[in-house]
Amino acid sequence: MRRLVLLLAVLVLASGCARATIEGSPVAQAPLDVASPFDQEGSTDPSTDPSESQDPESSPIDGEITPTCAKLKWTDLPYPGAKAETPPTQINYDSTFEESCRWTTKIDDVEVGVSLRYREGKQITIERTTGDWDVKGHKVVYLDRSDEQDVEPSCVLALPYNGGGLGIIIIDSSGKFGSVCDQGRKVAEVLIDRETA
């Protein structure tokens, strides 16, 4: 009899937990950012609803644009429609890095974009890599995720930058702007050119 009471108590508790989960707000990954493959210090991106994506001109930003993020402009990206002075879509969204920013937009109802993370005084590493390039004297390691089923087509890059480390993520399933890793390499080239500017 005690076993039956204990079993019923466990079932009631389990169903209560399941109900609490169902009634709660789901935690969605931020739009256009895969679960961060960079070395982490215990934090992930805040949640936002991908359906709430906005045009670059009207997108909110969190705080002032940071120095590394200010080096990349919308006109450096292959996506049409935004002016160079338009700020990133989001700033300072990942507290595990000194700087984080992203530029996202919709192309034919497909979301595309770039995110940057910068860490002062320490390299950023990727948990696994596909390969590496020498880009203007910087070793750029990358992970091509364009064929992985569980994430949007994306490319993750990491490189030494301005005495620290820079991480770049490109997400683009539109297929209109070349391969995601080629896009990432071009972003890296732009930022390396402006590293000491």
Image (spheres, helix red, strand yellow):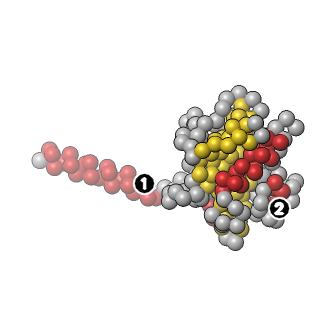
| Residue 66 image offset from top left, x and y in percent | 79, 40
Q: Residue flagged by tag 1: what amino acid is it?
A: Ala
The answer to which image quadrant residue 180 occupies is bottom right
Q: Residue flagged by tag 2: what amino acid is it?
A: Ala
The answer to which image quadrant residue 117 occupies is top right
- For the point 26% across and 48% down, the residue is 10
Distance CA(mark 1)–CA(mark 2): 43 Å
Does the CB distance between marks 1 and 2 fall below 8 Å?
Answer: no
**How many tags in the picture?**
2
| Residue 35 image offset from top left, x and y in percent | 56, 48
- For the point 58% across and 57% down, the residue is 146
- According to the picture, the residue beneath numbered tag 1 turns out to be 20
Q: Residues within 10 Å of mark 1 (few under 14, many from 20)?
A: few
- For the point 86% across and 59% down, the residue is 83
Q: Which mark is residue 82?
A: 2
Q: Quadrant of the C terminus?
A: top right
In the image, residue 139 sits, relative to residue 51, either above or below, namely above
- Label 2's element? loop
Q: Is residue 14 left or right of residue 197?
A: left
